[in-house]
Image: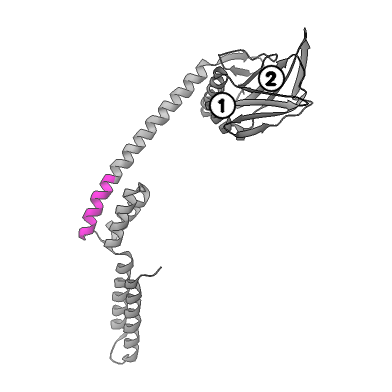
Amino acid sequence: MINKVTVNSIFVFALAFNQMGCSSESVSNSEMQVRIDELEQALEECQNGPDKLLAEVIRSHQEGEYARTKQIFLEMKEKYPDRPQFEEADSIYQLAEKAYMKGQEALKKKLAEANEARLKALNSLKKEVDDVAGLTWYHQPFFTHYTNTNRTSIYMGKSYGDVWIRLRMSYTGEDWIFFDNAYLSYDGKTREIQFDEYSDKESDNDAGDVWEWIDVTLTEDLIPYMREFAQSPNAKMRLTGKYSKTRKLSRNERRGILLVLDGYDALKAK
């Protein structure tokens, strides 16, 4: 929106230009250009003068917009280095620079701590190495996920430069549920786990007990969800088909998921 000062400046500019046109015989082209330049400079100061630039330096600093503060400060340094407003802008910029550097150091420390935690998680995982195939499997250390148990877990594999995560969901009981759908859910946020009923699902039975399970590769889009899922004490799994089985994950199941995810981040960063 054009403010009142800007409108007035444009009006003065137009009036002066008109007057110069009416008395063109007494005003040379060079004098006319000087007046135009003066009016353009006056208009520029109305729109982007030291007061307005200083106000923007103050605002951007207060709102933590370091890049904007620096941009406007450098503009003032180029245009108005001798104005008193520049001195105030300089002091504000120095404060912004210190705050920015402090924030960068804190971020660097936080990233280093996070990387250290991920490496610690990776080293705590159980490893199964197949040096012939060039393959290593990493499992969480809290329990062994047998297929004839009621469990949900993830584990990961590494082959040369490739790293991936697999998800295992299993059910056991006295009766078949014949599930053909699988879900993970926490606090009302539910995701369906896609699997092929013929190639990804298996079943077995022994001594009056039956068990059904899936073991599938976890897609990248599910990884952020899995971290939030495992942090919730309300994390649940559901297998459903002819019948249904829903259960809340144990603390060790959730801890195992988080540990593998941290290890996965560490491997991906290498």
Is 242 inside the magenta-drawn segment?
A: no
The image quarter containing residue 99 is: top left
Asked if disc 1 and disc 2 are in contact, CB closer than 8 Å, the reply is no
Label located before the other in sequence (1 or 2): 2
Circle 1 or circle 2, nearest the eye: 1
Magenta segment boundaries in residue numbering: 83-95
Q: Nearer the viewer, residue 232 or 15?
A: 232
Q: Secondary structure at mark 2?
A: strand
- Whether residue 180 sits left or right of residue 42 in the image: it is right
Is 92 inside the magenta-drawn segment?
A: yes
Q: Main secondary structure of the magenta part?
A: helix
Q: Secondary structure at mark 1?
A: loop
The image quarter containing residue 267 is: top right
Q: Nearer the viewer, residue 106 or 29?
A: 106
- The amino acid type found where label 2 is placed reads Ser
The image quarter containing residue 240 is: top right
Q: For the residue carrying disc 1, how many other residues have a C-alpha within 10 Å: few (<14), some (14-19), or many (20+)?
A: some
Distance between the Cα atoms at labels 1 and 2? 19 Å
Taking the spot 32% from the left edge, 72% from the top edge, the residue there is: 5
* Residue 170's disc number: 2
Q: In the image, is residue 249 above or below residue 1?
A: above
x then y, percent, for residue 269: 51, 29
* Residue 234's disc number: 1
- The amino acid type found where label 1 is placed reads Asn
Taking the spot 29% from the left edge, 86% from the top edge, the residue there is: 28
x then y, percent, for residue 190: 63, 33
x then y, percent, for residue 142: 56, 14
Count of labels shown?
2
x then y, percent, for residue 195: 72, 29
